[in-house]
Every structure is written in C-alpha cells, then in structure tokens.
Amino acid sequence: MNILAMDTSMGACSVAVLGADGTALGLHAREALMARGHAEALMPMVQEVLAKAGISAPELDLIAATVGPGSFTGVRIAIAAARGLALATGAKLYGTDSLTVMARDALGRLSPKGPFAVAVDAHRGMIYLGIYDEAGEQRDGPLLIAPVDAAELVPRDLIVAVGSGAALLAESCARQRRHIETALPELQPSAASLAKIALEVRATVPILRPLYLRPADARPQQPGVARR
C-alpha cells in the first residue's frame, strides 16, 4: 500500500509518503514551518516526496489529509489537494483531525504515563483542545474552548499538555491550584504521523470535509440600498 499524507492546517506545510509491503515500511517526508504560503508550497513538496519514494501519483492507494481544526484557509488547502489527486488517480481518501495527529507525534517524543492534552492557541482568548489517554486514544475533543473552561474539563489525573496553547491551559489550571506540565510548544501536525495513523486504521471516507470549530472571519456582504 502506498499512502500520501498532507497537512497544511496550522503553522507548517507537511507531506509524507508511506509505502507498506506487508513486511517493511518506507517513509519519506518533508516539512517546512510557515505562517502562510502553504498553497504555493504544497504541490512542489508532494512531487519532491513522491520522487524520493520512487513512486508516481497513479501508484498511490490512499491519500490522507488533516481536516482541522486550524486556519480557515490552511485546512482547505490540503483537503482540496487530496480531493483533486484522488480524482486523478483513483486513490481512496482518509482524514482525521489535526489534534489527533499531534497527539501521535507527542506520544513518540514524551511517552506520557497518563492522560495528556493537546492544546493549540486559537487566538481571541481560545484554544483548540483534545484530550488523549496514554495510548493516544482520543477521550474528548476537538473543542474550541476558553482556557478557564478547559481547566474545568480536563481530568484530574491529566499530567501534561502539549502544543502552543499548553501554557494557557496550565495557567488556568494553576488558578484552580492544579499543576500540569507543559511541553512541545512548537508541536505541529506531522504528515508522517498522519500516514502511520492511516495505515493502522485502514479506513476510507467518500469525501473529505473541513472541520471548522469557529465561523470564518469573512462575512457575506449584506444587501442594502444604494445611495448617491
């Protein structure tokens, strides 16, 4: 099975190709941190990683993308690319939320001994929150929530939070005389982790749909009366 995975949901553009022949895995990945420019960077990165893996697009069996939460535009970029490539190649589609992908990466770097949280700064006084057990199984989320409300929600035995919003969550917990550790503030969704999840789950979806936890900033123009 050949899997192409893509993420453009947050502060990085990430692409990976995972080839599995039943006995061995071959992983080729490329990631670049960027605040913007994902749309221009994505397809050249896809071509580069496919070339490193030694396969062509028609040889792909599964195309995976993160579906959010994240930036409104960023989430759409990987989903649109996945849809287009699937249409052109006949590959199946798979998608999961970006926080679950981050949790998978955190597991390999921290090996938590209990539940942990993925918290991403969503700005405007809010965080994206996911709660996971020590095996990386999602217990709650993804949620768009104020840190003070998140502190009420997280389990009492939660020991660590990761991501750019971890410090915000820890501060709110401290006000309630609870202590949690923070780690990996630079953590981004990784296409390599997404590809591994897709291989393990071996599920497909007929279509990828964005997961938006807040409405877009732009609003349709309201009809009005033209005046001179």
Image (cartoon, helix red, strand yellow):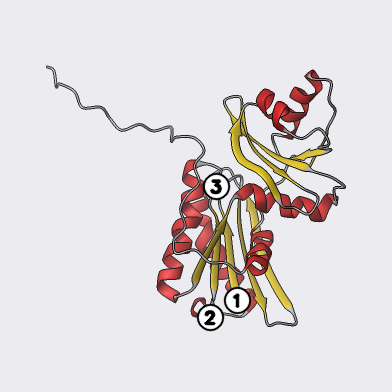
Residue to which mark 1 is pinned: 2
Of residues 55 and 178, the one nearer the viewer is 178
Q: Position of residue 98 (x, y in %)?
A: 61, 49
Q: Which residue is mark 3?
A: 68
Report the amino acid beneath label 2: Glu
Q: CA distance from mark 1 to mark 2?
A: 7 Å
Question: Of callouts 3 and 1, which one flags the residue occurring earlier in the amino acid sequence?
Answer: 1
Alpha-carbon distance for marks 2 and 3? 27 Å
Residue 110 appears at what percent x and percent y? 84, 49
Name the element at disc 2.
helix
In this rendering, the answer to whether 162 lies above or below 18 is: above
Q: Are marks 1 and 2 in contact (CB under 8 Å)?
A: yes
Q: Amino acid at mark 3?
A: Gly
Q: Earlier in the sequence, mark 2 or mark 3?
A: 2
Q: Which mark is residue 59?
A: 2
Q: At numbered mark 1, what does the secondary structure look like: helix, strand or loop?
A: strand
Q: Residues within 10 Å of mark 1 (few under 14, many from 20)?
A: many
Identify the mark nearer the N-term, 1 or 2: 1
Q: Secondary structure at mark 3?
A: loop
Name of the residue lying farthest toward the left: 228
